[in-house]
Amino acid sequence: MNNVDIGQALRELREASGKQAKVVARGAAMSPSKLSKIENGALAPSVIDAERILTALDVSGEMKARLVEIARQVATEATAWRIYRRSGLHKHQEEIRAIEASTTLLRLFQPSCVPGLLQTPEYVRGILKDWDLTEEALEKMVGARLKRHDVLHDEGRSFHFLITESVLRWEIIGARPMAMQLDKIISMSRFPNINIGVIPQRGAKPGLPTSAFVLFDTRLATIEVPHAEITTTEIPDIELYLNKFRKFERVAVTGDGMRDLVAGIRNDFLRQQETD
């Protein structure tokens, strides 16, 4: 099946549903013009695109699984960050938000920076300072990322975050803003549907941290590498990252122990700020 075939299948499903294109596009967190290009075969839908469209159409079961698999085979699974910058980083945040909204259990491992769902506005700006964004693009990105935080208040969803201790010590922004970021992590860890684990620097580890990744239930994984974001729905790939997550989870500090560890690092930043 090529771009035209999968686009035609999506268009036929939409027409059969009786839903207008603009309604489906809105539900899939994309512009009507993008949906039109996909339906006309001018643009190959990514795995995320296909899943969002099919969810907006209320397609479930075998049909959804088959079309998502076709999209995986047709689409390029690695998307360079420069392409997201070109089209608008805030738009990609909206795409991620749509996937998060349809996820019951999100597992995230992050050895590079504080997870996006836990970031303060100052931290978002700090990690994007070298991305050569206009002030308007930066503010759109900050707003879109913070909007994603709304999903954390849905207690029908669970979030498991694993962060390496080195992330918490990496001073990407000033000492005081870092202390505020760590306070946010401590605060969010008290939510009943949020579990935050910190992998301490000391002690034996079950493997190398390699790259950040997110597991959306057991149907989709995204992996971040320096030049691109990789998306996969392949079961062996998802199981690989799920096993990696579980191994790191066993050596992570959680609960009050985690909060004590993070508070200690926060206090180090506050003392540093007093002497700067």
Image (cartoon, rainbow, N blue to C red):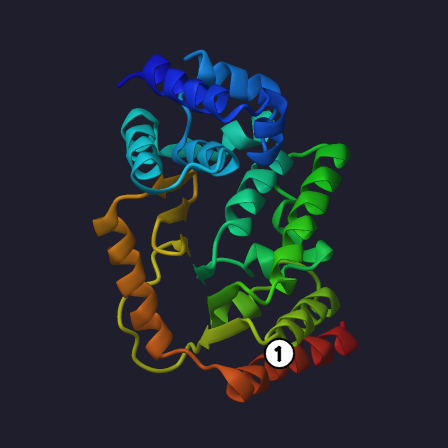
Left or right: 229 in relation to 185: left
Asked where in the image residue 27 lies, by quadrant, the reply is top right
- Say if 199 sits above or below 86 in the image: below
Above or below 44: residue 64: below
Q: Quadrant of the C terminus?
A: bottom right
- Residue 269 percent across, percent down from the top left: 67, 75
Residue drawn 67% across and 41% down?
Answer: 141
Disc 1 residue crowd, few under 14, some 14–19, many 20+, Cα 10 Å: some
Q: Disc 1 designates what residue?
A: 190
Nearest the viewer among 164 and 150 is 150
Residue drawn at the location 67% of the way across and 34% of the way down: 133
Would you identify the image quadrant in which residue 263 lies? bottom right
- Is 104 situated above or below 200? above
- Quarter of the image where the N terminus is located: top left
Q: Which residue shows up at 72% across the image and 45% down it? A: 143
Q: Secondary structure at mark 1?
A: loop
Q: Amino acid at mark 1?
A: Arg
Relative to 198, 85 lies left or right = right
Residue 24 x, y percent position in the rendering = 57, 28
